[in-house]
Image (spheres, grey):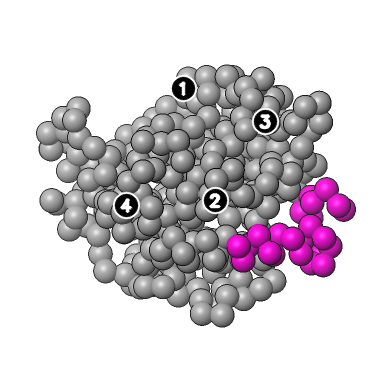
Amino acid sequence: MLVDCLILPRTSTCDGPRGYATADAWKMNATLALLFRQTSSLKSTMKFSTAPLALLALAAPITTSAWSTAAIRSVRTVPATILHGYSTATSGESATESFRLSFNEGDATISPWHDIPLKGGAEGTYNAVIEIPKMTKAKMEVATKEPNNPIAQDVKKGKLRDYHGPIFWNYGCLPQTWENPNEEHPELKCFGDDDPIDVVEIGSKALAMGTVAEVKPLGVLAMIDDGELDWKVIAIATDDDLAKEYNDIDDVPDAVKDGIREWFRWYKTPDDKPLNGFGFDEKWLDAKNANEVIEETHEAWKKLRSGEIEAGKLWTGKN
């Protein structure tokens, strides 16, 4: 396919990706990908798992608001819905800086970062807090510096952040984890990004913002964003039909793995940001490595929560 020819060989270090033009490369690839889209017969049976830049081509023409009707509907149905024993409630107006989605257990407000346990109900599973449902664009995240850490839309330079196209998977974080910005990775020579570890859930369903989903980790990718280590765990919800087939990274189709990596490589470039890079020769590490990384970030979180590591501006419920 023409789109496959647009994926160039690349290398990267913690200093950032090398061997690319940034904005010009993006414009060239986006133009060619869009041309491919316009001149190809895209039938209704086409899958999103074709080629990484085909995904970007599909994303480019999206012009709807980050808070699409579907996204608003997802938010509105979350309050009073019991999710693994937790309920959620919204305050403020969607698509504004005032919007918050808070978590409750009974009558008490809880932190999705600190109070929801990391481990799932079944052995080898973890709880994932979904921040961004698949096929939406608003850059929602657990507000690590606010009391009780509600989900809010990220703000950069006074503006609400949106992706330039929808994300094709459910995206969130694993509670009770933390990528320590004070600790250098022994091989990658990068420091953590000061956030809970990210999870990309690849199941067939769109999970509403605030969902607490039990997931099975399949692998992990070492993304390097502006010199910081930002792990991406790929996982599948245990109640998804594909969960029986997917047990390790080699079970996941290459198109899905490549699509995730390329999406995260390119997604900041429309803002004239450089391409993101990846450690370990850009390879997905397997489920065993994913579990090890998750446990390492869990240990770092324990030290943060206990006060052994200075929290700074982060809200831990102990400061």
Q: Earlier in the sequence, mark 1 or mark 2?
A: 1
Q: Earlier in the sequence, mark 2 or mark 4?
A: 2
Seen at 57% across and 33% down, the residue is: 211
Where residue 299 sits: x, y (%)?
68, 64
Label 3 or label 4, whichever lies nearer to me, is 3
Residue at mark 3: 85
Residue at mark 2: 123
Instruction: Report the span colored magenta.
Output: 295-319
Label 1 or label 2, whichever lies nearer to me, is 2
Determine the image quadrant of residue 310: bottom right
Determine the image quadrant of residue 50: top left
Q: SS class of the residue under badge 1?
A: helix
Mark 4 closeness class: few <14, some 14–19, many ≥20 residues within 10 Å = some
Q: CA distance from mark 4 to mark 1?
A: 28 Å
Residue at mark 4: 252
Q: Label 3 sits on what residue type? A: Gly
Q: Earlier in the sequence, mark 3 or mark 1?
A: 1
Q: Label 1 sits on what residue type? A: Ala
Q: Earlier in the sequence, mark 2 or mark 3?
A: 3
Residue at mark 1: 70
Where residue 53 sits: x, y (%)?
27, 50
Q: Label 2 sits on what residue type? A: Glu
Left or right: 118 as drawn, with respect to 258: right
